[in-house]
Image (cartoon, helix red, strand yellow):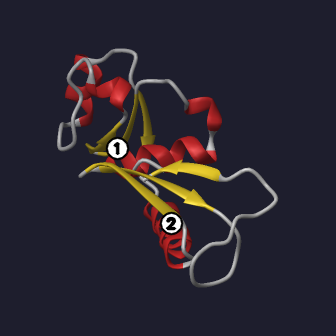
Amino acid sequence: MDVGAFFVAVERRDDPGLSGLRLAVVDRVVSRASYEARAPGVHAGMRAADAHRTCPTLVAVPSRPAAYERASVELFALLRAGAAVEAEHVARSLVTARGTGTGPAAPSSHAPARSRA
C-alpha cells in the first residue's frame, strides 16, 4: 500500500481496472493524485476542473472516506501484528505481512504479501 498516494492505492485495490490510469480522488478539489496523474501536473488541492484541463485523460473518482478509514485500520492491524517493514525512503516503506496473531510475525507457508506503505 502506497501511503504517499493512499487514497489512490485504496481505489486501485478495490477496482484493479484503475491500475495504471491517470487517477485522482476528488471532492471538488483533488484530494490525491496517482503518480501517473502527477507527471503532467495534477496535484492535491487543485480544482477538479483545472485538473481535467491539465490532464484531459484524467480519471476522477469521488472520495470515499469510509473506505480509506477501513483500509487504514487494516494497515495498522498488519503493523501491530508484526508485519516486517523495510524502509526505502522517509516517505516510502515496504510492508511484508507474514503469519497471523500478535507479536513478531512468523513466516507462513504462503509467499509474503508485499504492500507499498
For disc 2, the neighbor class at 10 Å (few under 14, some 14 to 19, many from 20) is: some
Q: Label 2, secondary structure: give it.
A: helix
Is residue 85 at least partly visible in the picture? yes
**Relative image position of residue 29 (x, y in whole percent):** 24, 43
Q: Quadrant of residue 35?
A: top left
Q: Which residue is mark 2?
A: 75
Q: Label 1, secondary structure: give it.
A: strand
Q: Residue furthest right?
A: 109
Q: Quadrant of residue 77?
A: bottom right
Count numbered badges in the picture.
2
For disc 1, the neighbor class at 10 Å (few under 14, some 14 to 19, many from 20) is: many
**Relative image position of residue 25 (x, y in whole percent):** 38, 43
N-terminal label among 2 and 1:
1
Q: Which residue is mark 1?
A: 26
Residue at 70% from the left image edge and 64% from the top image edge:
107
**Relative image position of residue 11 (x, y in whole percent):** 52, 45
